[in-house]
Amino acid sequence: MNIKLILFFLLITGCHTMKNQNQVMPVFDKQGHRGCRGLMPENTIPAMIKAIEIGVTTLEMDAMITKDEKVIISHDAFFNHLITTKADGTYIEAKDEKKYTIFGMTYAETQQFDVGLKLLPAFPQQKKLAVHKPLLSDLIDSVQLHCKKEKREEPFYNIETKSDPATDNTLHPAPEKFVELLMEVIYRKGIAEKVIIQSFDFRTLKILHQKYPSIKTAALIGPKDPKSIEDQIKDLGFTPSIYSPEFSLVNKELVSDCHQRNMKLVPWTVNDKKIIESLRVLGVDGIISDYPDLF
């Protein structure tokens, strides 16, 4: 009986390994930032569906946690005055927006706020429609259903953990809990082989590397980070799957350095077609853009 159990375990492990090996990242990864923020309301299901129709290979998005420990898709820890309409049709004022925190509301309470109707001058092409911040689980369901219906390959999911040491347990859970809640959804929905977890907060990436080493990780790098790539990786404690800097930091030397370290280089956020083409010539492995129709 013990031998049979061991053989069964090996069979299951082997099947999982084969499946994992088959999930190869695209040769050039076309990532839609917050779905396709330039064309549809950011971080919403319609934005993700539109990005798939355009032809992205990866959906980029941001995760926050609600008061009742639901993983919700949101870039900000609060309802941003630039995109939010309250239930009574009025807008949140800039001075008050940080009173409306995601972590301070249940998921049901977050659904009282619209994030797709308010005009956003920074993105004049963005289609306006009534829409709410979705659960990660609902977003995955919608993407999978759409891909099945349209006979499209399911994209990868690049999910950013929106956390910071200064706001642990006030705007989001501590990193261990954050990662636990996020990974529960990812495994429950069966998309682990299709997921990249990215963050500026290296604490979450370290936890992922320790507890979920098969999950792809991306180190986000800001334009004013004074550290060298060598020091950044030293701080992280391991070599991530992807190095993801602000696009102005990319040059030929950085491309070479990343590839020598066996890391893919995927810069953010590029909204100019000429710059996209110049980065491709340099040899980057993908690009994150608000306008994936530029690829």
Image (cartoon, helix red, strand yellow):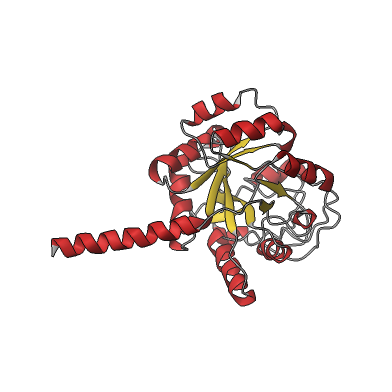
Residue 287 located left or right of residue 183: right
Residue situated in front as seen by the camera: 94 or 243? 243
Q: In the current view of this chain or complex, which residue is farthest to the left?
A: 1
Please state the horizontal and vertical placement of residue 257, each as a whole percent of the image.
61, 31
Please state the horizontal and vertical placement of residue 11, each as a whole percent of the image.
30, 63
Q: Quadrant of the C terminus?
A: bottom right
Residue situated in front as seen by the camera: 73 or 104? 73
Q: Quadrant of the N terminus?
A: bottom left
Please state the horizontal and vertical placement of residue 202, each as a whole percent of the image.
52, 35
Please determine whether, in this image, residue 93 is positioned above or below residue 293.
Answer: above
Please state the horizontal and vertical placement of residue 139, each as a whole percent of the image.
59, 63
Residue 212 located left or right of residue 113: left
Residue 205 shows in this picture: yes
Which residue corresponds to the image point at 52% horizontal and 57% vertical from the top-left? Answer: 194
Which residue corresponds to the image point at 56% horizontal and 59% vertical from the top-left? Answer: 136
Q: Quadrant of residue 138?
A: bottom right
Please determine whether, in this image, residue 3 is positioned above or below residue 147.
Answer: above
Residue 56 located left or right of residue 242: right
Residue 66 shows in this picture: no
Please determine whether, in this image, residue 50 is positioned above or below residue 250.
Answer: below
Residue 202 located left or right of residue 114: left
Residue situated in front as seen by the camera: 34 or 131? 34
